[in-house]
Image (cartoon, helix red, strand yellow):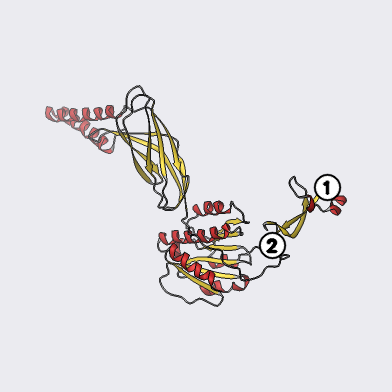
């Protein structure tokens, strides 16, 4: 198709030809013919297109922010003519990555590897491969797309954090619910037998009364939950990079608790982000959910979200420097431990009674301060 320059050349040439013919001057008409010939030649130049079969791989499909990821293109020349060296562009989100495709003989195959940008968190669509053919005068340009797009998941960057000690002993017969992690200690309810249940958990009296095998559902009510509340309103974050660091910090805390097989809740003022019971798959769930979280106006502030959190366990609030510490401290009696992570604060602040403050300038500083926090009582 014609570029804006090509359309301009065609319109000016046609107008010039009409004016020269009307006024009887051959010179403008000759210039107009030259312009129209150039436009026609540009269209013919951009018509040929190589027949390529393109398949794409991304390795790995999930990567932490800033970690390396590569795209791998397998290119086959499916045409009868050879293909000279080409420069194509593969879309990676809003970024166009230049890909050099070497010369291919008919039926030839080449594998091209290139680096993908991973500096921004999120779901990054990769592809299709766009091949642009333009004439030397840039009057005509034709874009052809090859290959099926795929998605690269750039997840939050995390640092290893230990689980904070609860600071309170939990009775094995404490509160239970259907969301309590499965265990062997505390009776929660009776349910119907399913294949795989241990015979020693069958409740014979209830089974005889109902005519259906009933088993005791045992849970572990002694595991405290780590609740992470993330401030996500755009109006309170002056720099988007500060919010990215806040997401990294929240992910690090959540992953540290999940790695110890403890339940984890993550929420913002807009509602819950993740609620895991504790298990080997929790880390993947938490990282995937935090990958797609963004700044968004919500009906409630972080403080309002904190006040609606179920009591118990540790409460971690991730917020910018201007947090309302007094209102957060008002809920300290409902939790075993309350920690506020202030991301790149502009001014110092005093911690209210019962609340621990950690100023986070980067993830390495968070790890050091967190380890110190775990050693203190």
Q: Would you call the spot at circle 1 few (<14 residues within 10 Å), some (14-19), or many (20 or more)?
A: few
17 to 307, vertically: above or below: above
Kind of element beneath mark 2? loop
**Which quarter of the rendering shows the N terminus?**
top left
* Residue bearing the label numbered 1: 212
316 to 39, vertically: above or below: below
Furthest toward the right, the residue is 209
Kind of element beneath mark 1? loop
Q: Would you call the spot at circle 2 few (<14 residues within 10 Å), some (14-19), or many (20 or more)?
A: many
Between marks 1 and 2 in the image, the one whose residue lies nearer the viewer: 2
**174 left or right of 22 in image:** right
Q: Which mark is residue 221?
A: 2
Q: Which residue is pictured at 45% across the width and 41% down the height?
A: 58
Quarter occupied by residue 116: top left
Residue 16 shows up from this direction:
yes
Q: Which residue is pictured at 50% across the width and 76% down the height?
A: 351
Residue 292 shows up from this direction:
no
Q: Give the number of marks.
A: 2
The spot of residue 89 in percent (x, y) is 35, 39
**Which quarter of the rendering shows the C terminus?**
bottom right
Q: Which residue is pictured at 87% across the width and 51% down the height?
A: 209
Q: CA distance from mark 1 to mark 2?
A: 27 Å
Q: Which residue is pictured at 54% across the width and 68% down the height?
A: 303
The spot of residue 99 in percent (x, y) is 34, 39
Q: Earlier in the sequence, mark 1 or mark 2?
A: 1
Q: Which mark is residue 370?
A: none
User: Residue 375 or 171: which is nearer the viewer?
Assistant: 375
User: Residue 288 or 113: which is nearer the viewer?
Assistant: 113
User: Residue 220 or 310: which is nearer the viewer?
Assistant: 220
The reply to whether the C-beta atoms of the residues labelled 1 and 2 are less than 8 Å apart is no
């Amino acid at each position: 198709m014609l570029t804006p320059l090509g359309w301009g050349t065609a319109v000016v040439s046609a107008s010039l030809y009409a004016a020269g013919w009307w006024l009887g001057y051959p010179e403008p008409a000759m210039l107009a013919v030259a312009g129209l010939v150039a436009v026609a030649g540009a269209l013919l130049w951009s018509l040929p297109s190589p027949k390529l079969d393109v398949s794409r791989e991304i390795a790995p499909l999930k990567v932490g922010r800033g970690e390396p990821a590569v795209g791998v293109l397998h290119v086959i020349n499916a045409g009868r003519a050879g293909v000279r060296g080409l420069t194509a562009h593969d879309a990676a989100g809003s970024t166009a990555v230049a890909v050099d495709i070497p010369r291919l003989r008919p039926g030839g195959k080449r594998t091209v590897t290139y680096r993908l940008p991973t500096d921004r968190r999120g779901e990054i669509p990769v592809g299709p491969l766009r091949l642009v053919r333009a004439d030397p005068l840039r009057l005509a340009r034709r874009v052809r797309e090859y290959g099926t797009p795929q998605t690269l998941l750039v997840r939050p960057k995390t640092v290893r954090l230990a689980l904070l000690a609860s600071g309170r002993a939990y009775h094995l017969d404490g509160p239970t619910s259907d969301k309590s992690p499965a265990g062997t200690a505390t009776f929660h309810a009776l349910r119907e037998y399913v294949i795989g249940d241990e015979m020693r958990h069958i409740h014979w009296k209830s089974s005889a009364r109902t005519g259906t095998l009933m088993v005791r559902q045992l849970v572990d009510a002694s595991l405290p939950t780590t609740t992470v509340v993330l401030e996500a309103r755009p109006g309170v974050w002056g720099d988007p990079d500060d919010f990215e660091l806040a997401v990294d910090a929240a992910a690090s805390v959540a992953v540290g608790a999940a790695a110890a097989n403890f339940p984890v809740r993550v929420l913002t003022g807009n509602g819950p982000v993740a609620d895991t019971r504790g298990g080997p798959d929790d880390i993947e769930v938490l990282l995937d959910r935090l990958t797609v979280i963004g700044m968004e106006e919500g009906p409630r502030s972080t403080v309002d979200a904190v006040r609606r959190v179920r009591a118990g366990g540790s409460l971690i609030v991730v917020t910018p420097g201007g947090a309302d510490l007094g209102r957060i401290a008002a809920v300290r009696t409902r939790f075993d431990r309350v920690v506020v992570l202030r991301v790149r604060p502009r001014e110092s602040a005093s911690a209210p009674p019962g609340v621990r403050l950690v100023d986070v300038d980067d993830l390495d500083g968070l790890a050091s301060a967190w380890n110190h926090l775990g050693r203190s009582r």
